Image: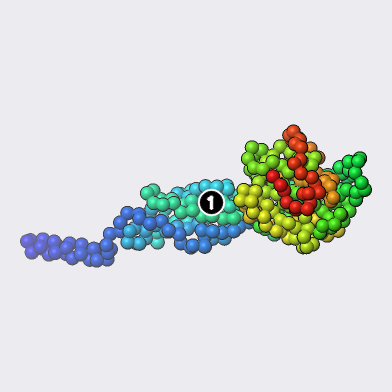
Amino acid sequence: MRSFTSALSLSAVFTAIACSDSSGPKAGPPANLGVVNQASLNQTAVIGTATSLPLSVVVSDASSRPLSGVLVTFAVATGGGTLSATTQTTDANGVASVTWTLGNTFGIKTVTASVTGLPVVAFNTIAIAPDAGVLAFNLVDPANDTIPPPADTGTYAKGIDVLSVQGIFKRDSLIVTITFARPVEFGSGQDALVGYLEFDIDDNAATGQPVYSNFFGASANAAIEYVVLMYGETGTSIYGVLDYRPNVLTAVSASYPANSLVVRIPMRLLGDDDGNFTIVGVVGNDRPTDFFPNSGSSLVRRSLGTSFTMRSSRLTAREAPPFTWSSLSRRHSPVR
């Protein structure tokens, strides 16, 4: 009997040793939260679609051994969209993954992955428009509504008359087409186009620069962060987009087909905006001749699920311009 018990005890010891050898060192608590694919940290995807790479993280201990069964929380930090799950537990390889489908607005979006006690991992994606494009705004301006020249002035060229202003989001850019009643030119001649298309990106009339177009007949209740300076230098570009905050000017491509001006504005020059903003503009040749819209400002809204424009009837008091249009045309840039 004693012999059988001793044999049984010895067997148990061998079994314990064998189990210890097969399992190896015991894994420690979660110490690291990393990403499976570095490329997933910064992606580009079309609105309403899933990112090409899943958002995958790996959890490991202090010795870099993957840990299974660890709870990982995923959350949309900015920009909306939907996740396939908000929590996932790591698999045998220490990996947890979710799929991120973007919402309907543009710009930089962020999803975070977190494990209690560890630094957060942030995944960023730039949401862009599809190749076919998405309508941003379509303003129709009355014909023959140009501002008449002062009675005491000499002969002026016929005023440049705006008929419509359309914006289309296409891939990573906003394509703006301004259609006129007659052809427009580039350069510095009397008939050459001068003008401004101004953007209030945050829709806050208390933040930003005064509306330049208001000096020349517009009545927008807004404050501007970006302005497109419409002055043709070469026939293939215009003076550019001015970001007032760092006061940086960047030239953009343009063309003059038929009776129109077509400008391609990379969204990065508008702060990678989400597609919701306020716009107002004024154009002319040797004088300001037409502003748009004729009252208030136009509010562009992507956040409502579709692109359309609401015209605001808000008005502001007119200020006396501190400069003339002719000096503006020579300077080719706003004077504040």
Q: Residue furthest left?
A: 2
Measured as percent of width and height from the top left, residue 291 is found at 80, 44
The reply to whether residue 91 is in sight is no
Residue at the image point whose x is 64% and y is 51% from the top = 247
Measured as percent of width and height from the top left, residue 127 is found at 61, 54
Measured as percent of width and height from the top left, residue 53 is found at 54, 60
Q: Nearer the viewer, residue 334 or 280?
A: 334
Residue at the image point whose x is 64% and y is 42% from the top = 208
Q: Nearer the viewer, residue 73 or 275?
A: 275
Q: Is residue 31 left or right of residue 188?
A: left
The reply to whether residue 288 is in sight is yes
Residue at the image point whose x is 88% and y is 51% from the top = 181
Q: Is residue 179 left or right of residue 169?
A: right
Residue at image mark 1? 110
Q: Nearer the viewer, residue 122 or 295?
A: 295
Total tally of numbered discs in the picture = 1
**Which quadrant of the figure has residue 33?**
bottom left
Q: Nearer the viewer, residue 197 or 156?
A: 156
- The kind of residue on which mark 1 rests is Thr
Q: Residue furthest right?
A: 155
Q: Quadrant of the N terminus?
A: bottom left
Name the element at disc 1: strand
Q: Quadrant of the C terminus?
A: top right
